[in-house]
Image: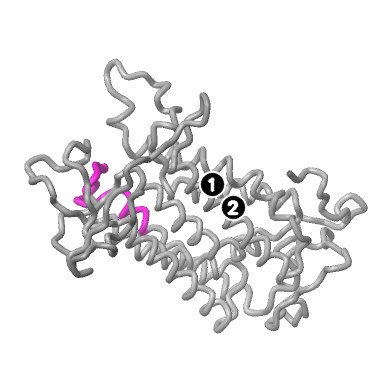
Amino acid sequence: MSWPLSFLSSTSILNSSISSPGWSFFDVGPFRIHAYALCILAGIILATIITSRRLTKRGAEPGVVLDIILWAVPLGIVGARIYHVLTHPGDYFFEGADLLRTLYIWEGGNAIFGSLIGGAVGAYIGCRLAGIRFWTFADAVAPALLVAQATGRLGNWFNHELFGLPTTLPWGLEIEPNNVAFPVGLPSGTLFHPTFLYEIIWNLLGVAVILYLERKFRLRFGQTLGAYLIWYGLGRSFFESIRIDPSEIYFGIRTNVWAALAAIALGLVIILVQRHRHPGLEPSPYVPGREWNGPDAGVEFDDSDSEPDDDTTADQSDDADHPESPEAAATSTSASRL
């Protein structure tokens, strides 16, 4: 078994390096199980659990998150693939190319920024159907996204991919010279920046920072999501700039660096606009007329937003497209859940 750090070596830890795993998949009968897929699946499960807990604390029905992720996860996967194909056109669109390969997701190629876009569309649809405010869900899922992304980055380690520039630092990543991504001309034994590890640390640190900011500044109505976009964009813009895998370049900057800068700008806009539009507390995780009245309804944590203030009327006006009616008053059902 290959360990992330060779700290069991008899030499000093300063002479250690990060070794790449000796396997990236295993077979179970006729099926091939990829470690990368397991990492992504584990990230989805963790994010679902965290988001569900945060939504429930805000007064949502336990398990309602499943109604939303049934849309968010599939569309997130589709968005991730579309983004990757469009930002790597040379790999898929050339004379004699088999265009069906654009669908071969098992060959690799899933972009986080694409998954965020597709996942947001899916979450919006799911929230509309479940009666949950989209911005409430966005805030609940924000720190969970960082946990999911940190978990998924382990897949890059198993795949020996997406590493950074050569380095002499003691935590350099070992990459085999016959790896197709190994730069031509470098000697065997060259170490590389473990960008997967940098991003894991950055993301997990971001969870603590965002939760602190959320509580201290009472971030609501999408402002926690805005903080996530800023934090992730800042880190990704740096990590992306030291990666050496092929990427489309526009005005001397990699595509994903542009995407990271766009995420920062969008996060700032969300925070400024929503803080101006909604200075008060969030009255309910549900849109008017779709409230859940179960035995455990209500907010459990101490900075409860369950008590409406003078801004409640203004906040509810944003949901005027949900008029109350006998049909609209029906609570969210659990019959469609897994």
Q: Of the numbered discs in the image, which one, if any, rests on residue 144?
A: none
User: Around disc 2, counting alpha carbons within 10 Å, would you say few (fewer than 14), some (14 to 19), or many (20 or more)?
Assistant: some
User: Around disc 1, counting alpha carbons within 10 Å, would you say few (fewer than 14), some (14 to 19), or many (20 or more)?
Assistant: some
Q: Is residue 197 left or right of residue 121?
A: left
Please count the marks in the image: 2
Residue at 15% over, 59% down:
167
Instruction: State which quadrant residue 47 falls in.
Output: bottom right
Residue located beneath label 2 in the image: 45
| Residue 99 position (above or below residue 282) | above
Residue at 63% over, 51% down:
124
- Residue type at numbered disc 1: Leu
Q: Nearer the viewer, residue 169 or 266?
A: 169
**Residue 292, position as x, y percentages in the image:** 84, 62
* Region in magenta: 244-261
Residue located beneath label 1 in the image: 41
Residue reaching furthest top? Answer: 96
**Residue 215, position as x, y percentages in the image:** 58, 80
Q: Is residue 278 left or right of residue 248?
A: right
Q: Nearer the viewer, residue 47 or 173?
A: 173
Residue 260: in magenta span: yes
Q: Are marks 2 and 1 in contact (CB under 8 Å)?
A: yes
| Residue 114 position (above or below residue 263) | above
Distance of mark 2 from mark 1, alpha carbons?
Answer: 6 Å
**Residue 88, position as x, y percentages in the image:** 32, 36
Residue at 76% over, 60% down:
62
Residue reaching furthest right? Answer: 326
Instruction: State which quadrant residue 135 falls in.
Output: bottom right
Q: Assign a secondary structure to mark 1.
A: helix
